[in-house]
Amino acid sequence: MRIRALAIRIIRQFVRDKRTLALLFLAPLLILTLMKLVFNGNTVEPRIGAVQLPAAIVERLEASDAEVSSFDDFEAAEAAMKDGDLDAVLSFTEGKPAIELEGSDPSTNKMVLLLLQRMMGADMPAAAPTVSYLHGSEEMSSFDNFGPVLIGFFSFFFVFMLAGVSFLRERTSGTLERLLATPIRRFEVVLGYLSGFGLFTLLQAALIAWYAIDILGLYMDGSIWLVLMMNLLLSLTALTLGTLLSSFASNEFQIIQFIPLVVVPQVFFSGLFNLDAMTPWLQNLSTIMPLYYGADAMRGIMIRGEGWSDIQVDVYVLIGFSVVFALLNMLALKKHRAI
């Protein structure tokens, strides 16, 4: 009888909590759908720049499912590769084939080399191509490629949890209500909490970046200060987003419910998986994901040695996300007290 009564109480609790029920049944379907769309997308075709190559070789490259662009000189092809439009440049130097790889993605490097060597092996079996790298090197591992994304993801995830749970406890313990009973204004409350939590996010962002680069030996070609700045901005975005969403949660369990809806989808669009393999409408979803901008800048700094001029758009977007989330948080505080 007691077991039955306990079971009925649990069932009634779940039935009354519509959000938990929706998460229980719909969140797994959402994640599975995203995984199907991400991993079952289009086949990625290597983009190769052909510098004054004979028409027969260009036709053979295109027949090998490569996307070929012809150039009159090597400098123009290399500039296109620096802009991210090519994965490799194929040319001939003193009668010998020369391949320059973009180099930031080891899996793409292998795919291009396999395609070119198979094609040349059939046409020119005696010609061994000279291989060089625009970024990275042949020793670059897969971890060096997705490590910058993981730095951003772990900073984002743990700060999101810290901010969400901590701000929620301020409400459930009555601290926030007592604070709002004073003449303090809502923007002062938000900025005060952001400053307090921000100190720990700053320390965490610096610790993660230092450990990944100096201890784990992650490939690093750019400025460590830019890496720290991007990691801090990403943490600030997670901080403002976590405090905002905590306003719509009643307990810690409901904060955790936001993870599969807010954090997990960002992993799929962060660059950890090849976005070019997704359909165009799905790629557009990455533009509303803060982690996409942070990971893009981190990868650019650490692998391609990019500077301020290359990452400033990502910086402005992350600042914009933080400002919008903070403003929305001020509006959300209205339900606790209108000042």
Image (cartoon, grey):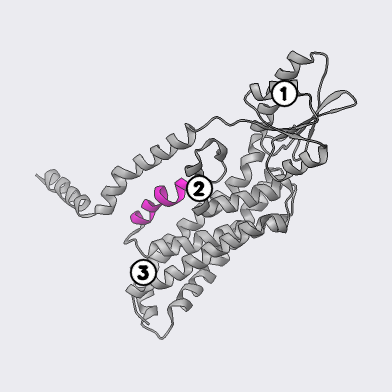
What secondary structure is marked by label 1? helix
- The crowd level at tag 3 (other Cα within 10 Å; few <14, some 14-19, many 20+) is some
On the image, numbered disc 2 is attached to which residue? 284
Please indicate whether residue 219 sits to the left or right of residue 231 in the image.
right
Q: Name the residue under label 1.
A: 116
- The Cα atoms of the two marked residues, 1 and 3, are separated by 61 Å
Residue 295 vertical placement versus 51 (above, below): below
Q: Which amino acid type is shown beneath numbered disc 3? A: Arg
In the image, is 128 to the left or to the right of 31? right
Question: Please, what is the dominant secondary structure of the magenta stretch?
Answer: helix
Determine whether label 2 and label 1 are within 8 Å by CB: no
Confirm whether residue 316 shows in the render. yes
131 over 275 or under it: above or below: above
Disc 2 versus disc 1: distance between alpha carbons? 31 Å
Q: Which of marks 2 and 1 is nearer the N terminus?
A: 1
Pick the residue in front: 44 or 4: 44
> Can you name the residue that lies furthest to the front here?
55
* Above or below for 113 versus 278: above
Task: Inspect the magenta stretch and tell me whether residue 257 lies in it.
Answer: yes
Q: Which of 109 and 169 is in front in this view?
A: 109
Residue tagged 3: 171
Q: Splitting the image into 4 quarters, where does residue 127 fall?
A: top right
Q: Specify the quadrant of the image occupied by residue 129.
A: top right
**Is the N terminus in the top left, top right, bottom left or bottom right quadrant?**
top left
Mark 1 Cα within 10 Å, few/some/many (few <14, many 20+)?
A: many
Find the magenta span and give its range: 253-265
Q: In this view, does 178 lie above or below 92?
A: below
Point out which mark residue 125 bears: none
Question: Mark 2 belongs to which amino acid?
Answer: Asn
Kind of residue at disc 1:
Leu
